[in-house]
Image (cartoon, helix red, strand yellow):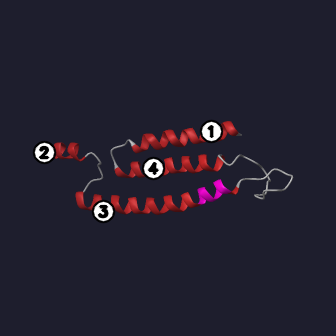
Amino acid sequence: MELLVAIAIGTLTAVGIYMTLRLRTFPVILGLTFLSYAVNLFLFVSGRLTLNAAPIIGTPEPYADPLPQALVLTAIVISFGMTAVIMIMAIGGYLSAGHDRIDLDAAEDGDAK
């Protein structure tokens, strides 16, 4: 189980980094989203993978740590809000410039030729 989760976190991180290094705004936004998913999964797993355990400390049976779950829930809400803000900024940049390229120097050189 731990190996599967580690592979999932690594895959999400690799895809996120690859997409973030693209030269268009939408793949960059998707890459940042994949990176936030990887971080959320990492935070969630940091609370140990326990099945059918209540988040109550002091009982004789094993318990699930509720703090990583609360952190992930907060991170999901924050990342959703930040993704919406970044999307609005990307749409505004596309509407004002007419393209969604990130490397503006290369775009100006391409327009001059």
The residue that mark 4 highlights is 32
Q: Are marks 1 and 2 in contact (CB under 8 Å)?
A: no
Say which residue appears at 49% left-offset and 58% top-offset: 79
Please tell me whether mark 2 or mark 4 is closer to you in this view: 4
The tag earlier along the polypeptide, 4 or 3, is: 4
| Residue 111 highlighted magenta (yes or no) | no
The residue that mark 2 highlights is 112
The tag earlier along the polypeptide, 3 or 1, is: 1
Whole-angstrom CA distance, mark 3 to mark 1, is: 37 Å
Q: Amino acid at mark 2?
A: Ala
Location of residue 97 in the rendering, given as x and y in whole percent from the top left corner: 23, 57
Identify the secondary structure beneath mark 1: helix
Location of residue 55 in the rendering, given as x and y in whole percent from the top left corner: 75, 58
Q: Which SS does the magenta portion mostly show?
A: helix
Residue placed most toward the observer, 23 or 56: 56
State the residue lying farthest toward the front: 58
Please tell me whether mark 1 or mark 2 is closer to you in this view: 1
Identify the secondary structure beneath mark 4: helix
The tag earlier along the polypeptide, 2 or 4, is: 4
The residue that mark 3 highlights is 92
Please rate how many residues cluster around mark 4, counting C-alpha atoms within 10 Å: few if below 14, some from 14 to 19, many from 20. many
Point out the stretch of residues depicted in magenta: 67-73
